[in-house]
Image (cartoon, rainbow, N blue to C red):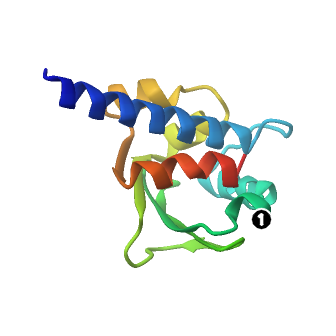
Amino acid sequence: MNAKNVSVCLTRLAVVAVVSMSAASAASNEPENSTPQQVFDGMRQSFQAAKARGVHARYQWELSGPNGGEWWIDVNDGTFKMGRGKIDNPSVTFVTSDNDWVAMSNGKLKGTWAFMTGRLKVHGSQSVARKLDEIFP
C-alpha cells in the first residue's frame, strides 16, 4: 500500500469515527434506540443551529434490513430538514444495515470496526461527513 492509499484509508477511518460518535451521541442520555427512526428522532433533538451556520450539506442513509429504508438530512445555513426517502445530490451517503446503524447509535458497535469489516460504507465528501458530529452531537 503506498502513502496516498494509507492517507485515504486513515481519512476514511477518521470519518467513520466521527459518524460513529455522532450516532452514539444521539442516544447518550436517553434509553437505547431500537429502530433507525428512533435514531433519527434523537438526532432531530440534538441539532446545533450555531454549528450549522454556513453549512450546506445533504446526508443520505441507505439502511438494509426489516427496519431499513432511506433517510436524509438537508442542512442549510443553520437550519435542517429531515425525512424518509432519497435526496437529490447527497454530499455524503452512509450505507449499512438497520441493526448496525442502531448498534452504532447505542455505542454497541464501533463505526471504525463496522467500516473496516465492510458493514458501513461512506461515499462522498469526507469533510462534510466529519461535520455531522458537530451539527448533531
Q: Is residue 41 left or right of residue 115?
A: right
**In percent of the image, x 37 and y 36: which residue is there?**
12
| Residue 74 horizontal/vertical position (percent) | 57, 72
Q: Is residue 43 left or right of residue 74?
A: right
Q: Is residue 92 left or right of residue 109?
A: left
Q: Nearer the viewer, residue 36 or 89?
A: 89
- Which residue is most to the left? 1
Q: Quadrant of residue 112?
A: top left
- Which residue is most to the right? 29
Amino acid on which disc 1 is placed: Ala
Q: Is residue 1 left or right of residue 29?
A: left
Is any part of residue 66 visible from this angle?
Answer: no
**In percent of the image, x 49 and y 55: which residue is there?**
128
Could you say whether the residue bearing mark 1 is in a helix, strand or loop? helix
Is any part of residue 88 visible from this angle?
Answer: yes
Q: Quadrant of residue 108?
A: top right
Give the labeled residue for mark 1. Answer: 49
Q: Quadrant of residue 119?
A: top left
**In percent of the image, x 46 and y 39: which residue is there?**
15
| Residue 48 horizontal/vertical position (percent) | 77, 58
**In percent of the image, x 52 and y 65: which residue is there?**
71
The quadrant the N terminus occupies is: top left
Q: Few, some or many C-alpha atoms within 10 Å of disc 1 (few <14, some 14-19, many ≥20)?
A: some
